Image: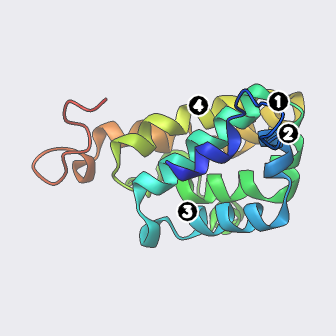
Amino acid sequence: NCLTVVFHQHETGAATPVVPAGGAQLRKPELLQVLTDIMDNVNCYGGVLAALVATLLSDVMNSDPQIVHDVHSSGLAKSFFDMILGKDIESRTSLGETVETWSEPLIEPSAELIMAIPNVISALSLTESGMKVVTETNPFPTLLSVFCSPKYAMPNSRCLLNEM
């Protein structure tokens, strides 16, 4: 769980250098690029790594709500929603198709990821502008459709079996 180690500050002595806070780390372009790449290519990296990224995002935003604006403005929030809803959210909305009519969720079938998603959505909603973006994006029907999809249930997947 190497991603979260960077973000947890430890009690430090005089000989140990101080680790910057998670918000400061998250503002670094290098880390932004890596996290965005993982969320944009979750099918290559897998659901477990995407879940670690989601957990990291929610932990940092919950510990420092001022970073929520940076997460939205940097494109991390958009990458997160694209990971859940698909990359062509704008084109689907412009064609008049709503999220509610989508039948099959695009979320990677990973129990860890499915459990981490609501925490990130909650953290993205900590500010008024963030709540507006979450409301407009409306990821809830897609998230709830996981529980009705054969892709996430036995015998096709063990995703929802005893892990949630």
Image quadrant occupied by the C terminus: top left
Q: Amino acid at mark 1?
A: Asp
SS category of the residue bearing label 4? helix
Tell me the CA gap for discs 2 and 1: 6 Å
* Label 1 vs label 4, nearer the camera: 1
Task: Mark 3: give few (<14), some (14-19) or many (20+) Cα within 10 Å.
Answer: some
The residue labelled by disc 3 is 86
* Label 4 vs label 3, nearer the camera: 4
Looking at marks 3 and 1 on the same chain, the residue that comes earlier in the sequence is marked by 1
61 vs 28, nearest the viewer: 28
Residue 135 placement (x, y as % from top left)? 72, 35
**Pointers 2 and 1 in contact (C-beta within 8 Å):** yes
The residue labelled by disc 4 is 119
Looking at marks 1 and 4 on the same chain, the residue that comes earlier in the sequence is marked by 1
Residue at image location 59% in from the left, 51% down from the top: 3
SS category of the residue bearing label 3? loop
Tell me the CA gap for discs 2 and 4: 15 Å
Q: Amino acid at mark 4?
A: Asn
Q: Which mark is residue 64?
A: 1
Tell me the CA gap for discs 2 and 3: 24 Å
